Amino acid sequence: MYGFNSAVKGLIASQRGLYVTNHNLNNINTEGYSRQIVKQRATDPFNISGVGFLGTGTEIYDIERVRNSYINLKYWNESAPMGEWGIKKDTLMEIEKLFSEPSDSGFGKYIDDFFESLDNLSNNPSEDSYRQPVKESGIALTKHINETAKRLSNLKKETEFIIETKIKQVNDIGEQLVSLNKQIHSLEIHGRAANDLRDERELLIDELSKIVNVKVNESDSGKYKVTINGITFVDHDYMTTMKYVPEDENNINSPKVLKWANGNKVNLKSGELKGLIDLVDGDGENGSYRGIPYYQKKLDEFAKGFAEKINEQHRLGYGLDGSTNINFFDYDEKNPASTINIHKDIIEDVRKIAAAGEDGGVEDNKNLHKIIDLREDKDFFPEGMSKGTPDDFVSSILSSMAVDSMQANRMEGTQTIVMKNIVRRRQSESGVSIDEEISNLVKFQHAYVSAAKMITTFDTILDVTINRLGLVGR
């Protein structure tokens, strides 16, 4: 009967090998799946006195998931920077589109049109037909500034909404990890690995690692711990949540910050969430990132500085009706870019455009020439990196944007290459190969057939021994 039992064990082992091979092939396109292999060994031999040890067959003692923890660590470490720079690259592209430079619908074109209309008026200062285009080109310029400011504000609100979405996603992943930890621990308490559940858990960590920088640790007892920048996020069957709330929770108008459930601030090193927060909070001050607030601030500086300089000279001139000391532009000090427009007196009467100088004659254009000359004034904007003419100021904004965008593109490109290499290594170890699985399929099938033939052979031997050797066996 030993031979028969050995054949049955071989049949069962081959059958389980076929099951695992079939499982691998069925999941060849399943995201996050790690191929599984059967661990097979000889069963304990039987010691026959005077003969020695007689083999008793084989057994499948484990089904192992092929996964390299070092490659996992590399993947999770590099995934966060890729997520951060990918977010920054995409958002900076949106900001570049808002400024529309260089193009026929950008700031340069509107400034050109405004000063060109002033130049045309300087040749015909007494003609209302030349004053109207000055008003219209001024309106077009201010509306473009208003619209750009509005779009930047909307982009910031959209980014804040994405932050809240990402935080919800992080908290959802935490809850799923806690649930999986409980299931895995319950199933593995007797020493068997819950392979598919482990794949599902590590797929969640893959997803989480792109949003925030994570570290994972599993103790010898199977307790699973996930930390974010050194702070425990999931401690096996317990998690803490994140929230995006006003820094002063008693003042809903205070700037929003990322906090843990206990009120402590969340500090992130990298990840999509870090990139989004940099874009929402980064004003470029004290080495901070140049995010949306930076470009809002520069646009406000441009609107205010442009209006003040033109107004300063315009107030010194005289209109056709003798009016003087009138601003050309109006704006709100708190939100210059959003509110800049043409002064209501000029909107109502273009004769109040102060073309004339002190003489105040209808053909006098001295003040208008001084306004036109301001475009080439190197002290138009007197301070900071944007010092110079209006064109210099716009160019400085575009230069900053180009540098930031180039950095984001380079960093995202570098991380993409790094991630591709890591994914390739992971796939080479953990991925399912059709050729390898088909080879295993043939191997286990042949082993199954051989074991079946052995069983048939032993059945024949027993049949002959019991049923065909006369009355002895009955």
Image (spheres, rainbow, N blue to C red):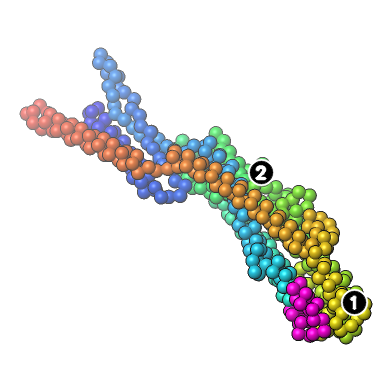
Find out whether residue 206 is within the magenta segment.
no
Q: Where, quadrant-wise, is the C terminus in this rendering? A: top left
Q: Is residue 423 left or right of residue 57?
A: right
Q: Identify the residue position indicated by label 2 in the image.
A: 229
Counting from the top left corner in percent of width and height, residue 307 is at 82, 70
Q: Which residues are magenta?
A: 115-136
Q: Identify the residue position indicated by label 1 in the image.
A: 357
Q: Earlier in the sequence, mark 1 or mark 2?
A: 2
**Residue visible at 55% across and 39% down?**
73
Q: Is residue 203 left or right of residue 100?
A: left
Q: Is residue 378 above or below residue 123?
A: above
Q: Which mark is residue 77?
A: none
Of residue 1 and residue 175, the one placed in the foreground of this image is 175
The answer to whether residue 129 is seen in the rendering is yes
Of residue 311 and residue 154, the one placed in the foreground of this image is 311
Question: Residue 446's quadrant in the figure?
Answer: top left
Counting from the top left corner in percent of width and height, residue 223 is at 56, 39
Three-letter amino acid code at the position of disc 1:
Gly
